[in-house]
Amino acid sequence: MDAPSASSVSGNQAQAREEVPRDQVSASGQKQGIEQIEHSFKMLHTSKIDLMQIHSLKDWQTHAATLRDMKEHKRFRYIGITHSQTSAHAELEEVMRAEKWDWVQLNYSIQTRNAEERSCRSRRSSHRGDGQPAVRGWRDLQARRGQALPAWAENIGCTSWGQFFLKYVVSHPAVTCVIPATRVRAPRDNLQAGRGVIPEQNWREEMVRYFEAHAS
Ligand SMILES: NC(=O)c1ccc[n+]([C@@H]2O[C@H](COP(=O)([O-])OP(=O)(O)OC[C@H]3O[C@@H](n4cnc5c(N)ncnc54)[C@H](OP(=O)(O)O)[C@@H]3O)[C@@H](O)[C@H]2O)c1
């Protein structure tokens, strides 16, 4: 696939965004949703997309029917829903119970742990086969730059704050995928968080205690 050119991005941001294929449907209305999805197929030069999600629960009942139909026709391998705000977790939980989703993407971090009480728990109790929550969010990381890690961090295989934050997320039993946003310098650091020791519950509790005692 050809990437959008720099000139198309800088020339007109709104138009450029529309030119980029999405792995999410965010339009309102069935027709608009289908058009947006078909546009992504066209731009990706493919007849099959692995995962298509409904962005921030936007018009989710309408798009759920579209995504189910396209999945039945083997155009998607998986379908899912997303939200990135804690205030939406109650609704997200209802939607998780109302429909069968393969993926649920939500905000979860050592700083923002609401999903432990709601969405991750309901994910585990819903017994829906291939469900795979994904997670985002750890902005507090920026404030840790320059601070030393606790001495015990080596017991859970962390040599950086990036790994400390990610290991907390990765080690939740309901989490199967983490999507930290990063530019060029951090991917190697972030990959290390998936290696070696994964903290068990007692270490997770210690991580939270330390985090809260040293909150920035
Ligand atoms: N409704 C939705 O579906 C929705 C909404 C919002 C976001 N998202 C998705 O959620 C994911 C996360 O996005 P986010 O905006 O919440 O970002 P984030 O992952 O919470 O944080 C990104 C920040 O963390 C820094 N960072 C990453 N790895 C680091 C490391 N090892 N050490 C130090 N700093 C590190 C990055 O800095 P550098 O850039 O300098 O590396 C960047 O400033 C993305 O995939 C995004 O597309 C989805």
Image: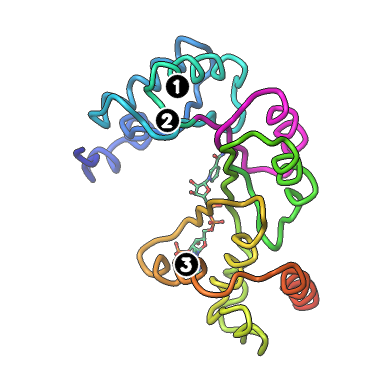
Query: Is residue 152 rendered to the left or right of residue 182?
Result: right
Q: Residue at x 77, y 35 (%)?
A: 90
Q: Point out the stretch of residues depicted in magenta.
A: 79-104
Q: Amino acid at mark 2?
A: Arg
Which residue is at the front of the view, 16 or 78? 78
Q: Secondary structure at mark 1?
A: helix
Is residue 102 one of those drawn in magenta? yes
**Dot 3 and dot 1 residues touching (CB under 8 Å):** no
Residue 103 at x, y = what percent? 56, 37
Report the front residue among 15 and 98: 98
- Sooner in the amino-acid sequence: mark 1 or mark 2: 1
In the rendered image, the vertical position of residue 170 relative to residue 46, given as above or below? below
Q: Quadrant of residue 17?
A: top left
**Quick one: SS at disc 2?**
strand
In this rendering, would 49 be left or right of 124? left
The residue at 66%/53% (across/down) is: 108
Q: Is mark 3 within 8 Å of ligand 1?
A: yes
Please state which amino acid type lies under the numbered disc 3.
Asn
Apparent side of residue 6 relative to residue 185 in the rendered image (left or right): left
- Residue at which label 1 appears: 71
